[in-house]
Image: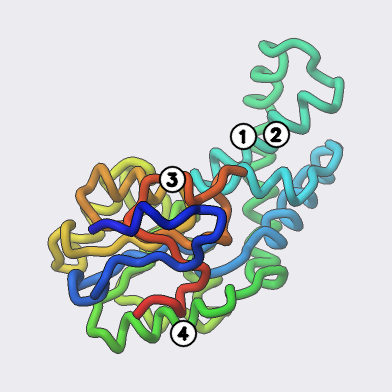
Amino acid sequence: MTIDATTPASCAHSSLPGNLLTRVDAAMVDLDGTLVDTLGDFAQALNRMLADLQLPPIAADTIGHMVGKGSEHLLRSVLKHVLSLSGQAPAAMNIEAQLEQLYPAAWQRYQHHYLAINGQFAQVYPGAREGLQKLRRAGLRLACLTNKPTDFALPLLRAKGLLEHFEHVFGGDAFERKKPDPLPLLRTCAALGSAPARTLMLGDSSNDARAARAAGCPVVLVTYGYNHGQPVREVDADGYVDTLSALA
């Protein structure tokens, strides 16, 4: 599956292969940055956790560049960033040591706060609900595949009225490895009963694209999510959409 490489990235909008949905039997859909803008939830939970540990807060924009590789990676990135700026651990080795010392309490407090506010500061992206409806009307079987812990993902999807669209929900703790490893995609394809080459990955970042390429799945990326601060159209993918409702 290819897109028109002659379309300049600066003026391109939604770019999709022809007859996209006739080429696939199922789709795997990412959650954070693809279906739901959860940056507000992350900022609230992380800054409440930091306050509990008597550490300074972190800006939401900075958090956005750290999202996408699972909660453990996010929490470690936040702690490392805050410790490096706080002056409490001037040497790199001291930062790593202090991070490891703080991590158990940080994880416990983060889980506590995230579960308490899950979805309260998050919004479904415009067109996301309509996109899922289009996929289902096209006869595709759907799974939500996210690096977010399952205990966070399920209540969020339920609260936002999206859970009903999915046959399966697999969080970052569902398999031995997380995206960008291809294992979660291959296991999800098996659960959906579809071949990887006919199972579309819909995501927002290079994590989703790299995992899809390694698994042999076609991949389409949304242009509005969390791609570690990098332009998403620079990522190797089969297509890009400005809204999931552009799927046709």
- Mark 4 packing: few (<14 Cα in 10 Å), some, or many (20+)? some
Res 149 seen here: no
The label number, if any, that marks residue 79 in the structure image: 2
Q: Check disc 4 and report the residue beneath it.
A: 130
Snapshot colouring = rainbow
State if disc 1 and disc 3 touch (CB < 8 Å): no
Q: Secondary structure at mark 3?
A: loop
Neighbor class of circle 3 (other Cα within 10 Å; few <14, some 14-19, many 20+) is: some
Q: Amino acid at mark 4?
A: Glu
x, y percent for residue 68: 52, 48
- Give the amino acid at mark 1: Arg
Category of crowding for the residue at label 1, using alpha-carbon neighbours closer than 10 angstroms: few (below 14), some (14–19), many (at least 20): some
Which mark is first along the chain, 1 or 3?
1
Residue 107 in sight from this viewpoint: yes
Residue at 18 percent across and 57 percent down: it is 196
Instruction: Looking at this view, name the residue that lies furthest to the front.
Output: 6
* Label disc, if present, on residue 235 of the rendered structure: 3
- Of discs 4 and 2, which sits in the foreground? 4
Q: Which residue is mark 1?
A: 76
Q: Residue at x 66, y 17 (%)?
A: 97
As rendered, which of 108 and 124 lies closer to the eye? Answer: 124
Q: CA distance from mark 4 to mark 3?
A: 25 Å
Judging depth in this view, the residue of 43 and 109 nearest the camera is 43
